[in-house]
Amino acid sequence: MPKSSLIRVRNLRFRYPDGTQALDGVAFDLLPGECVAVLGPNGSGKTTFLMHLNGLLSGEGEISICGIPVQKNTLPEIRQKIGFVFQNSDDQLFMPTVLDDVAFGPLNLGMAPEQASDRARRALEQVGMQHAQGKAPYHLSAGQKKRVAIAGVLAMEPAILVLDEPTTFLDPPGRRALLELLKTLPQAKLLVTHDVGFAMDLADRAVFFDQGNITATGTVEHVAEKCGWR
């Protein structure tokens, strides 16, 4: 694959202390502007793989994010490049107001409060939630919480978005609205999901994890059919 890969993984291996071989030689690339769906059963290695991308776990092999090797001394820079949107938005929303939540990351980067608030407002506008900036997050619907959680990640200006089961808790209108929003965002995306229909609507291609390795790659439809994931 070209050197311009935003995520480049080679021969990634990881064994948990109990002896479980969670990753067994994974190779993967994510290119600029690309959306790749990550499919596979629970326990197949998907979450372990994701946790290596921002240094929460460290195994054998090579990983680089935007050309930067993932290692202890580069983690602050890595974690600005790759933004994680959790499955449960309540895990990301904990401040008194929506604006406070979205400004939290920029403030932690050392930005002045006014600058962080400006960046937060721009991110909220990007996801169509600027009207809610003074609200308490717990007053929002599941779909609105997801948008605010995404705004919190966008405020860090990452190059890559990692979306972990983003349609969980969403009703059909919320799911459609999320799909339309994600289509407008220019970042490259990793979409971890069991929702094959959503993946088909958003992703350029898919990879399938099974027993710690990627066992299939191709269009979402091809991978889902080949792996019995429909």
Image (cartoon, helix red, strand yellow):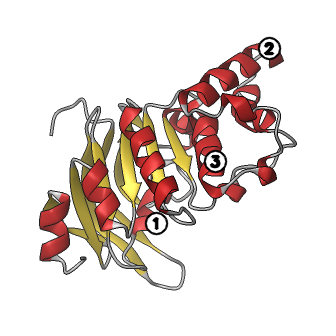
Residue 36 marker: none
Q: Which amino acid does label 1 sit on?
A: Thr
200 or 46: nearer the eye? 200
Which is nearer the N-term, disc 2 or disc 3?
A: 2
| Circles 2, 1 touching at the beta carbon (< 8 Å) | no
| Count of numbered tags | 3
Along the line of sight, the residue nearer the viewer: 47 or 21: 47
Image coordinates for residue 140, horizontal then vertical, percent? 73, 50
CA–CA distance in space, label 2 to label 1 = 37 Å
Specify whether 47 is left or right of 128.
left
Q: Is residue 190 left or right of residue 174?
A: left
| Relative horizontal placement of residue 186, taking residue 141 as reference (left or right) | left
Q: Which of marks 2 and 1 is nearer the N terminus?
A: 1
Residue topped by disc 1: 48
Q: How crowded is mark 3: few (under 14 residues within 10 Å), some or many (20 or more)?
A: many
Which residue is depicted at the point 57% across and 66% down? 169
Give the CA distance from mark 3 to mark 1: 28 Å
Per the image, the residue denoted by label 3 is 144
**Location of residue 35 by image quarter:** top left
Name the amino acid type tagged 2. Answer: Glu
Q: In this view, does 49 lie above or below 17?
A: above
Q: Mark 2 points at which residue?
A: 114
